[in-house]
Image (tube, rainbow, N blue to C red):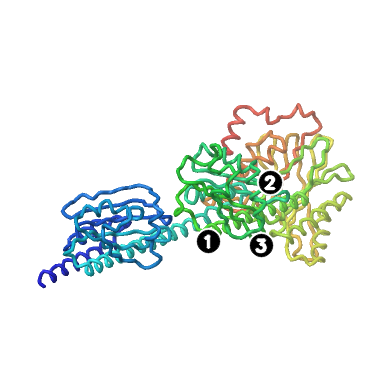
Amino acid sequence: MGRGTGDDDAWSGALHRLWQAASRAEEVGALADDVYAPLLATPGVHLVVGTRWDEDATLRYMRALSAGSDTPVIVAAARSMPGAAAREPDGEPVVTRTAVAGLDDGAWPEAEFLRQSPGAAVVACTFRLDRRGWAALSLAVDPSADTEGVARRLAQAVDVIVACHTGILQRGREARRAASDALLAEASLQMDSSLDVEDTLRRVARIAVPAVAEGCLVHLLRQDGPEFVAATHVAVRQQRALEAVGRDDPWLAALLDRRGDADQAVFLSGAALEGSPFATSAPAGPGPADPHPTVVSVSTLRARDRVVGTITFIYQRAEDRLPGTAFLDSLASRAALAIDNALLYEMRRHAVLSLQEHLLPSTLPAAPGWDLSASYEVGDPMLDVGGDFYDAVPRPDGSIAVLIGDVCGRGAEAAALTGLARHTLRTLLEEGTEPGTALSRLNRALRQERASRFLTAVVVTMTPRTDGTALLTTCSAGHPRPLLLRADGSIGEIVSGGLLLGVLDDVAYESHEDSLGPGDALVLFTDGLTEAREADGTFFESVLQQRLSALRGGDAARIAETLARQARTFRASGQDDIALLVARWNGTSSSGDLASSEDLTPLETLLEQAATR
């Protein structure tokens, strides 16, 4: 009795240590020593043999350890044994007692070891580890063994093994779920960080490789079918092959056509891939050299109740590393929204730019002695239509009227007022109306229309004189003062002012006269130019005259485009549109008598380059 009590105590301690080891184990095989040794210490037990089986009765490995030995015998092989299917447990672990002589070699590969114990019987337990496989633990016992006690201990050990495996699977699922959640979050951040269509599509393809799959293809849905737009592969050398499949393969095109508006991801493997570039029998293509069979999944990209395309993943990995349908659906949903946002943004950008173009003159008139040019930079990242406008209008007396204006705010209402203001001023100036009168009549029209926004504008009439100069007559309605770039590089400012348009009912605007000599230029601009701001708070206005002076001798286009580009590069904040209109007076002499941008001296060129840095 004392011996039995001590043995039970030893087993209890061993079982406790086994539970502790199970809580730390990362794979079931790590428990072998903690399981085999205490079972072999049980009186009457001479041999422990463990086997691991796939669901189709394929033996994966066998491990045998006999009493008195410290070295187990391990047999690793993929051996099909159909007879072992009769031993496969359906649910709970099954404990059996069998004489060694009665073992069937077709079902019991353990027999070759168990028969080495003379006069032995077998106490065995078969148990399921997961849906893909099962295991068996068999003990060879002699007649002195308490088979009931041995069976009980065996069952207890199996309980620990099953609990350990279940815990490992659960922790694995939790780890994969956490990794999937992190990947989805990172994918959303990456895909949402760009509103450029091509960049977004490339991000969608790259974000999933190799975390989700070895290859990825993205197609957009067009009226005439799927259009290949992006691909990536974990093997760089396979990139072009995968792109060719995405662009030209008829099997893939037909598959994507059949997808229609299906919601859930579909997986294809084996016979379903026959005839495809991913089939096992296909010549070397986009799949890497890998022992795992290729699996292909296709997910529909749906956003805002419409299908925008498909995303196809190519896998060359073990089945337990394939992503779940729910994960792929979530990834596809996020990708679809990012792509749709980029597509809508692109459509809006084209619409805004088109509308903006219609609010501005398509060309500026050609007039003897004058070089006219304009530049327009859209500054708002949301791409609402801006309120900046400009124009140049030939007048009946042979003069040219140039104008520039800025409606407060952005959007549809600002665009409507922009069109009203520009066309009203143009019509009046074409009829010969004086600039001040034209501004007063525009102000009256805005008040009658009960416009909720105000605007600024400046109108300058430019009249050639017989002495080779040009007379400037300027009227301003609260607009930034125009600048004069003289041929020698000096800068002048036209001093004129007046009340904003659309604020009071009856407003009169005074005119101010200046003159241009040959090679001089008049520069009109909106406040988007002067209010462009560097990160340290410096406004472009503080360097405008220096930058303008460096452009002396340049033609009108060079002056307008360079100033707009410099302001765009200069600003770290400030998103207003920038409009510039430059009128350069060439005088009555030929253009060959005047300095052009190509005629700048080396010193002048260096001065200009220094000013633009």
Residue 613 appears in the picture as rendered: no
Q: Which mark is residue 326?
A: 1
| Separation of marks 2 and 3 at Cα, in angstroms | 57 Å
Label 2 or label 1, whichever comes before in sequence order? 1
The residue identified by callout 3 is 305
Hey, what amino acid is under mark 3?
Asp
Other residues around mark 3 within 10 Å, as few (<14) / some (14–19) / many (≥20): few
Disc 2 packing (10 Å; few <14; some 14–19; many ≥20): some
Residue 130: x and y in percent read: 40, 61
Left or right of 417 in this view: 254: left
**Residue 151, located in which quarter of the rendered image?**
bottom left
Secondary structure at badge 1 equals helix
281, above or below 593, in the image: below
Q: Residue furthest front?
A: 101
Mark 3 residue element: loop
Residue furthest to the bottom in view is 1
> Relative to 214, does residue 446 appear above or below in the rendering?
below
> Does residue 491 appear to the left or right of 431 in the view shown?
left
Residue visible at 47% across and 40% down in the picture? 289
Answer left or right for 572 relative to 517: left
**Which of the image's four quarters has the C terminus?**
top right
Which residue lies under the disc numbered 2?
Answer: 493
Task: Please indicate, yes or no, whether residue 199 appears anywhere in the rendered image.
Answer: yes
Label annotation for residue 260? none
First in sequence: mark 3 vs mark 1: 3
Q: Nearer the viewer, mark 2 or mark 3?
A: 3
Looking at the rendered structure, the secondary structure element under dot 2 is: strand
Please name the residue shown 38% across and 48% down the image. Answer: 78
- Mark closer to the chain start, 2 or 3: 3
561 and 109: which one is in front? Answer: 109
